[in-house]
């Protein structure tokens, strides 16, 4: 998931918010302002489909629309928007519980997290967190949600049973994304201004290690076997590969311009990286750590997620107001789905929740 503070619509009233009244952590925002002004004025059509019948197990993609204050729910069988859910102000990050029953959405401008019941696609709880919440990740047991508060330099830990914040953890400068290892023992947090990654022990909820990475680390993805963490460095146009046993960077991979959202295929063999500045996706062979394919997508690709079967990747194109659907076998975009304005983050259910 992958959400950038620099993508603020001019009428959001967020300019000057944060430390010393500056948005210092996104140096290239000026290059995007004109595009934002145009996008904010567009009314994008939504493809509407009837909700799938109960018991149908096909996954659904949840896409946050920053400028619309909504989440688009895409039926991955038909690749149409089946539902649009109103959430908080400036939704960015999204994560789904392992049982598929809840989606947690960070509202950057509202300092809250919206909790969506995915069976009814309604918001059942709004949780107050820190300043400018950005990324979110759920532990494998589904009991906790970790939320990065980019202007507070903290991570809020939400008990998903009570939907209350139980702990707040100090991390680095401008935390953006967070990912939890498959064994649930550690959470990795990118610190955009600090050019570091904080490693949290999820048992004690303390930072145990800080890892130096590239310039402007933003998004994170962890390999299915938990042995590697991948970090996109927006300002460095690279991906840092972290050995999670030693917590050291073992490789740095050159990718496209402004790499942002990433996703690893379920078999761990490929890493997909959205290059927002180039409007394309780099496909990395994780065995050789080399880019093997470049796939054109929409304008301003941000968040990304891959279906549980590994056959498709969904890419949120912020400036196009669309999601590109990539067939991972042929490595081409086969479908483009219109969403709300400013699609940012993407998460996909493991399967359709049953009653």
Image: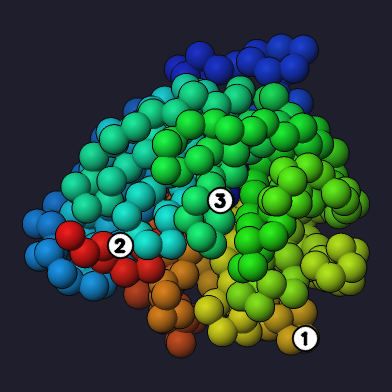
Image point (26%, 66%), residue name? 352
Image point (28%, 46%), residue name? 117
Quadrant in which residue 314 is drawn: bottom left
In the drawing, does residue 346 fall left or right of residue 120? Answer: right
Indicate the position of residue 284 as horizontal and vertical percent values.
67, 77
Q: Nearer the viewer, residue 34 or 25?
A: 25
The alpha-carbon separation of the residues under discs 1 and 2 comes to 32 Å
* Disc 2 to disc 3: CB gap under 8 Å: no
* Disc 3 to disc 1: CB gap under 8 Å: no
Task: Please identify, in this view, whether the residue under mark 3 or under mark 1 is nearer the observer.
Answer: 3
Indicate the position of residue 156 as horizontal and vertical percent values.
61, 34
Indicate the position of residue 218 as horizontal and vertical percent values.
70, 48
Image point (46%, 70%), residue name? 306
In the drawing, does residue 160 fall left or right of residue 147? Answer: left
Residue located beneath label 1 in the image: 288
User: Which numbered disc, 3 or 1, marks the residue that appears first in the sequence?
Assistant: 3
Residue located beneath label 3 in the image: 137
Against 220, is 217 above or below? above
Indicate the position of residue 55 as horizontal and vertical percent values.
15, 69
User: Which numbered disc, 2 or 3, marks the residue that appears first in the sequence?
Assistant: 2
Residue located beneath label 2 in the image: 60
Quadrant in which residue 126 is drawn: top left
Classify mark 3: helix, strand or loop: strand
């Amino acid at each position: 998931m992958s959400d950038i503070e620099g993508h603020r619509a001019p009428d959001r009233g967020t300019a000057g918010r944060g430390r010393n009244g500056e948005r210092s952590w996104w140096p290239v925002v000026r290059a995007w302002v004109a595009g934002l002004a145009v996008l904010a004025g567009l009314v994008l059509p939504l493809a509407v489909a009837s909700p799938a019948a109960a018991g149908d197990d096909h996954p659904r993609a949840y896409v946050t629309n920053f400028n619309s204050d909504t989440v688009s729910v895409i039926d991955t069988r038909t690749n149409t928007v089946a539902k649009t859910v109103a959430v908080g102000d400036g939704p960015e990050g999204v994560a789904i519980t392992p049982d598929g029953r809840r989606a947690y959405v960070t509202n950057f401008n509202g300092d809250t997290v919206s909790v969506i019941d995915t069976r009814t696609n309604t918001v059942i709880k709004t949780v107050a967190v820190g300043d400018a919440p950005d990324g979110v990740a759920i532990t494998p047991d589904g009991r906790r949600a970790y939320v990065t508060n980019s202007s507070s330099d903290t991570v809020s830990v939400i008990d998903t049973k009570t939907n209350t914040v139980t702990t707040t953890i100090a991390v680095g400068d401008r935390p953006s994304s967070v990912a939890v290892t498959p064994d649930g023992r550690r959470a990795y947090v990118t610190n955009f201004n600090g050019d570091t990654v904080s490693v949290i022990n999820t048992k004690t909820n303390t930072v145990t290690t800080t890892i130096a990475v590239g310039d402007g680390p933003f998004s994170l993805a962890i390999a299915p076997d938990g042995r590697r963490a991948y970090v996109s460095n927006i300002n460095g146009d690279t991906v840092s590969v972290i050995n999670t046993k030693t917590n050291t960077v073992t490789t740095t991979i050159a990718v496209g311009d402004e790499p942002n959202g990433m996703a690893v295929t379920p078999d761990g063999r490929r890493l997909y990286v959205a290059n927002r500045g180039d409007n394309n996706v780099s496909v990395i062979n994780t065995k050789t750590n080399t880019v093997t394919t470049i796939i054109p997508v929409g304008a301003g690709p941000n968040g990304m997620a891959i279906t549980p079967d590994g056959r498709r990747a969904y890419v949120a194109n912020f400036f196009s107001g669309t999601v590109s659907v990539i067939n991972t076998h042929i490595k081409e975009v086969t479908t483009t789905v219109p969403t709300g304005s400013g699609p940012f983050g993407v998460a996909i259910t493991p399967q359709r929740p049953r009653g």
